[in-house]
């Protein structure tokens, strides 16, 4: 498929799943500007299911009857959809972590976390989501922490975003896993797309000793986790020595959050482009009652 991300290596060991598995998805969209020219020039076949801009090639009558309508449909698709997707992908690809960094990078034991380049990442994702995705709820889930289902109050997953070591790493990891598991990729993307006005972005940027998830819903927690997991130089707070084994659980939650979001984004982009191409194909149809420009004596058939 056109928009396919292949994950190389053993993805069971999530701690070593590098960011390039996701970064190359955005790099593909950002760097392949030929996709834009493809729509304008109609000279290359797009491998979308059952859609071809070249259906007119075997029937040149379309060029005479629907050239203007087709040009308008293509222009609308390029300017209202594809250009914005490419621009957003370029911004994300520049803000995402380095190729060798693992997703969900955890600071060393007894060390605090760092936010990383959150602003550019949010800007790019928001630009794409605004074009391709309507589903999702930025407030999905509840505000109950995994430990005892009481309301979150600076003692759950929010501690992963502190700038000091996580003293309750196991509890934080369990709450992070609970939050990510409770929401969809669309929920995560919508939480991120709230931008600086949203709690997910504020959580990802958090830079204080105390946790920051007081009364925050699951989608907010998952959105903050996905952002910090992908952001260049982003790290979660390291566990204390007693809870060092919690690191794997945090990494797993981070990988899950990013994977959910990217899978949803991939499908949404493909659906959006598929619908756009269908509109172009519809515009290319001719009036079935029109007289063919092909000569009846030339062996050409009427459309």
Image: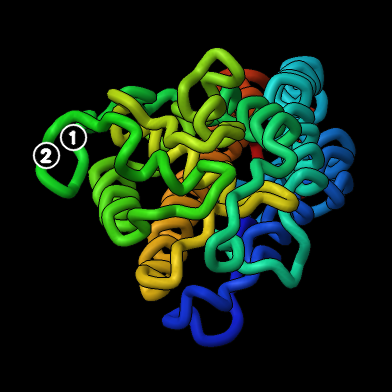
Residue drawn 52% across and 19% down? Answer: 194
Percent position of residue 6, x then y: 59, 72
Describe residue 167's horizontal placement relative to residue 133 as left or right: left
Residue drawn 46% across and 22% down? Answer: 199
Describe residue 225's horizontal placement relative to residue 112 as left or right: left
Describe residue 38's horizontal placement relative to residue 165 as left or right: right
Q: Which residue is mark 1?
A: 144
Residue drawn 51% across and 86% down? Answer: 10
Q: Residue reaching furthest bottom?
A: 10
Residue drawn 54% across and 62% down? Answer: 110
Quarter of image, res 173: bottom left
Q: Looking at the picture, tell me which residue is in the foreground, 60 or 121.
A: 121
* Image quarter hosting the N terminus: bottom right
Q: Which residue is mark 2?
A: 149
Q: Few, some or many C-alpha atoms within 10 Å of disc 1 (few <14, some 14-19, many ≥20)?
A: many
Describe residue 177's horizontal placement relative to residue 287 as left or right: left
Does residue 102 sit above or below 140 in this rendering? Answer: below
Whichever of labels 1 and 2 marks the residue nearer the N terminus, that label is 1
Does residue 240 sit above or below 59 in this rendering? Answer: below
Percent position of residue 9, x then y: 57, 86
* Image quarter hosting the C terminus: top right
Percent position of residue 152, x then y: 25, 32
Q: Kindly indicate whether the residue at mark 2 contacts the one at mark 1 (C-beta within 8 angstroms).
A: yes
């Amino acid at each position: 498929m056109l928009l396919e991300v292949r994950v190389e290596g053993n993805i069971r060991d999530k701690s070593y799943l590098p960011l390039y598995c996701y970064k190359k998805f955005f790099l593909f969209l950002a760097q392949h500007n030929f996709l834009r020219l493809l729509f304008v020039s109609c000279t290359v076949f797009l491998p979308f299911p059952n859609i071809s801009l070249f259906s007119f090639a075997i029937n040149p009558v379309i060029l005479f009857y629907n050239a203007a309508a087709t040009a308008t449909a293509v222009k609308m698709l390029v300017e209202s959809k594809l250009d914005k997707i490419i621009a957003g992908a370029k911004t994300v690809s520049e803000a995402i972590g380095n190729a060798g960094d693992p997703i969900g990078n955890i600071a060393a034991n007894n060390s605090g976390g760092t936010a990383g380049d959150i602003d550019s990442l949010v800007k790019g994702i928001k630009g794409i989501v605004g074009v391709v995705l309507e589903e999702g709820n930025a407030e999905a889930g509840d505000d109950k922490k995994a430990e005892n289902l009481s309301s979150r109050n600076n003692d759950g997953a929010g501690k992963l975003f502190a700038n000091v070591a996580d003293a309750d790493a196991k509890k934080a990891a369990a709450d992070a896993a609970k939050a990510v598991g409770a929401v969809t990729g669309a929920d995560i993307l919508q939480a991120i797309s709230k931008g600086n006005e949203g709690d997910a972005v504020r959580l990802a940027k958090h830079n204080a000793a105390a946790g920051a998830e007081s009364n925050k819903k699951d989608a907010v927690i998952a959105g903050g986790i996905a952002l910090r997991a992908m952001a260049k130089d982003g790290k979660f707070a390291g566990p204390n020595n007693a809870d060092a084994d919690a690191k794997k659980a945090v990494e797993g939650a981070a990988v899950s959050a990013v994977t959910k979001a990217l899978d949803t984004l991939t499908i949404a982009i493909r659906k959006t482009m598929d619908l756009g191409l269908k509109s172009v194909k519809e515009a290319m149809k001719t009036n079935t009652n029109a007289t063919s420009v092909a000569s009846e004596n030339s062996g050409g058939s009427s459309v």
